[in-house]
Amino acid sequence: MGHSTHTLHTHTPHTHTHSVVFAGFSAESLRARILDGGVSVVVTADEGVRGGRGIPLKAVVDEAVDGVESVKRVFVATRTGSKVKMDPIRDVPLEEVAQCV
């Protein structure tokens, strides 16, 4: 995952789709792609950095997936260490998953 992208995954019994989305998208644009693709997993970071400024990637994802039932997990990588809201059921720190493999 690049420093300024989100990764979207769709799983069905016979297919797996992976899509990289530019982090500059608004929550509405990201939500449209999530709904169009029936996305079940989003991989993002706490923040991105562009021009020395933080980009609130996780906050954008939170807004985009709010109420979207197809999204079961949001994996969140630590990029800047910024404190972000984590849903205790949906959100998983990516570093925790990496320790298991």
Image (cartoon, grey):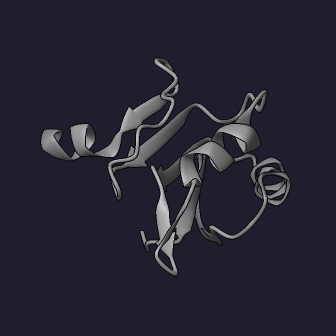
**In front: 29, or 99?**
29
- The answer to whether 25 is drawn above or below residue 89 in the figure is below
Total marks placed:
0
- The answer to whether 67 is drawn above or below residue 20 in the figure is above
Q: Image point 74% across, 66% down: which residue?
A: 25
Residue 40, position in %: x, y? 62, 41
Q: What residue occupies the far bottom of the structure in this picture?
A: 51
Residue 97, position in %: x, y? 26, 40
Q: Image point 39% across, 33% down: which residue?
A: 92
Image quadrant assignment for residue 67:
top right
Q: Image point 32% across, 45% down: which residue?
A: 94
In this orientation, does residue 10 appear?
yes
Taking 93 as reference, is 2 left or right?
A: right
Residue 28, position in %: x, y? 85, 52
Image quadrant assignment for residue 29:
bottom right
**In front: 90, or 62?**
62
Q: Image point 24% across, 45% down: which residue?
A: 95
- The answer to whether 8 is drawn above or below residue 88 in the figure is below
Residue 14, position in %: x, y? 59, 51
**In front: 48, or 15?**
48
Q: What residue occupies the far front of the structure in this picture?
A: 52
Taking 63 as reference, is 18 left or right?
A: left
Quadrant occupied by the N terminus: bottom left
**In front: 63, or 53?**
53
In this orientation, does residue 101 appear?
no
